Image: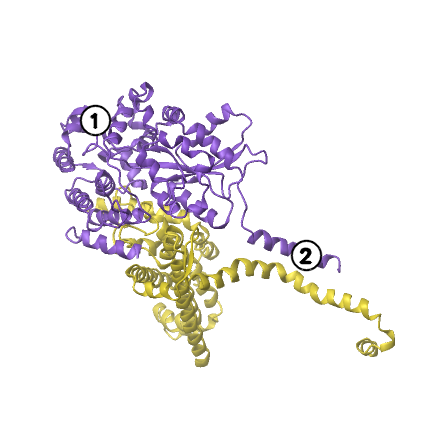
Amino acid sequence: MSGVTLTLVPAPSTAPPPVTRTARGLGERLAPYAYIAPFFVLFAVFGLFPFAFTFYVALFDWNPIGDQVFIGVDNFTRMFGDPRFWNAAGNTVSIWFLSTVPQLLLALLLAHVLNHARLRFALFFRMSVLVPYVTSVAATAIVFAQLFDRDYGLLNWVLGLVGVEPVDFVQSTVGSHVLIATMVVWRWFGYTTLLYLASLQAVPRAVYEAAAIDGAGSWQRFRHITIPSLRPVIIFTVVTSTIGGLQIFTEPLLIATGAPLTCGAVRQCQTLTLFLYEQGFGEFEFGYGAAVGVALFVVVVVIAAVNYLLAGRIRADR
Amino acid sequence: MTLRLPALLVTAALVLAAACTPGTGGGGGGDGKSFEFWSFAAINQKVSVDAYRAKHADVEVKLTEVGTSTETAQALTTALAGGKVPDLVLIQGDNLPKFVQQPQNFVDLRTLGADDIKGDYLDWVMKQSVAKDGEVLGIPTDVGGMAIAYRTDLFAAAQLPTDPAAAGALWPTWDAFIETGKRYKQATGKAFTDNAATSVFYQAVNQVSEKYYSEGRELVYDRNPQVRAAFDVGIKAATAGITAGQTSFESAWSAGLAQGQYAAVAAPSWMLNTIRSTAPDTKGKWAIAKIPGGAGNWGGSYLAIPKRAKNPQAAWNYIKEMQSPQGQLDHFGRVGALPSTPSVYQDEKLASSKDPFFTDAPTGKIYTDSLLGLKPFYIGPDSATIGQEFLNAITNVEQSGGNPATAWDDAVRNIKTAIG
């Protein structure tokens, strides 16, 4: 014990010469920063800088191979008056709604089933729901676009067997939204299911058994035990799927191959991110594209703030 | 430790520097003879590069097939804005005006001797790559011309004439083309052509004497009666029930082409390659007739040299040799792309060329005829955007149940939004 005290209070006479000490001390003090530097350098170059630069570019009429003229907030005023922006915003909300609601309901039911004590091959089923999640989104989009094709699609062939006229999913507004939402649900339901399942397994089995003994049926147990105990994670998945839904890009880009950047002739399934991409890298209006990016950022921040408030309220309730 | 720390920092600084410094040039070696060439995919550019290399064994050509013509233009824009540029790049005519607006990004080919060869090319084609102060930014490699490719077997089944001259006589005008389509549909119950937007409107609007801009380079798309007439004929075709509703170059369009879902398709010279590779089993079932209206052009590309190119001279040597009238004629023999040099149009190799895939249609003659009667117009920086919105409006009526009565007004409004 006393030895420790001694090293903590070094006598001035035993101190090494000042020059060596500072050089060595500086090196030792900086070393940890050097070790963690790669991440921060890469983040600064590929994350922070582009992020901050977007705000700067948004204030310009920015031609990447020509002039860059400062125009203040003109890009934003143009955006608020641009029907294409509002169309993309509407499509995004519509696709988000059509994909999130069925996805969460499906995941909730599946998690409830997978959590069942007497389910055989539980591990197999729990693993298989993740298969769509690990499939490349581009591959998913191409396969689904073929399944939903007007002339040669499997779905329309089946519909034809029961006498239904072929449906042109991609060219109609509702159809294209349903098609994209189906792909999103397909890709994400397994992931959400596992989140719910993990949370459910924290619920003591005794609660379910007690309810069963008291005469609660399956639905009542689902309604009064499963859902309340999942409330925090449901809020979490709603928020993450909302943020994900605002950024849907690959699916709409790949289904309308004739007019990919607008997702069809009348922009029927063009989402906000696709509109951003069309303006930035199709039309090369970098400034306007950046402005759309800033708007998207603001929306995501607002949703994150709502999440924070809701989560706080749940904690307060408990 | 004291030794390693600076090393780490230097490494980090190098990573940073490498990530931030714009590339300073293209490939090619340091010998000044070799060069890097960006071209489109699926146009068989390699054949010509190989032919060039066979004659110049000391020249290395690094050919990159970037993607579609649009993707190539996008990659070029990104490269010009601060990346590694090629020494030589192929630019499709529709993408050209945006680059011509910013001539500072390219080598003015007059400095390499473009004035000596300028006269070899079709005047109106050459004009499109000349910037406002006379800078020559690109040399035309080919033009499309216009024609209709049709299935003789399907025409025969519908009791329509199969001989190219007789088939061409069915449709002196676009209205007559639509009437023929109705006859075909009545006889077979099947679609006559692939779509109204590309196969009718886009052809008709490229047969005008003044398009989206006036002679004085003013925007006139919304009040030019010729554009309106082309649009109306497109809407008429879209609502006549004669189209398959297949947007050109989509996967279902390709499938429809191979399966005979439609019997006729607008086909500039480069489209013959598309048909040949998309539907190889239909060999000998096609023929080519003249386009309604007789003359017009769709497509054609240019070779340009970016300003920051490392070996502009090597790239220019390639242009000069391969894009000479004789070079383009040889290229026609290899891949069928129509020369932009009228001096070879009478050449036996071109004038009497026949294509067995298209039942020995005299392709050279049909396409050169469609060019010689052409009325050139000015193509401006927003021409591509305007054209796309008109195409979209017609596709909307044809495939998404859009209202034909308001289609024109909707298109004009969308164009105003798009071009600001």
Q: Reply above or below: A129 against B47.
A: below
**Which residue lies at the image location 26% right of the left edge and 24% below the top edge?**
B365
Q: Mark 1 is on which residue type?
A: Asp
- The secondary element bearing badge 1 is classed as helix
Q: Is residue A9 above or below residue B280?
A: below
Q: Quadrant of residue B205?
A: top left
Describe residue B153's horizontal placement relative to residue B95 as left or right. left
Report the chain shown in purple.
B
Quarter of the image for residue B245 reads: top left
User: Residue at label 1?
Assistant: B153
Q: How many other residues sit within 10 Å of disc 2, few (<14), some (14-19) or many (≥20)?
A: some
Q: As rendered, which of B276 and A220 lies closer to the eye?
A: B276
Q: Is residue A40 visible?
A: yes
The amino acid at mark 2 is: Leu
Residue B48 visible in rendering: no
The chain ID associated with circle 1 is: B
Disc marking residue B8? 2
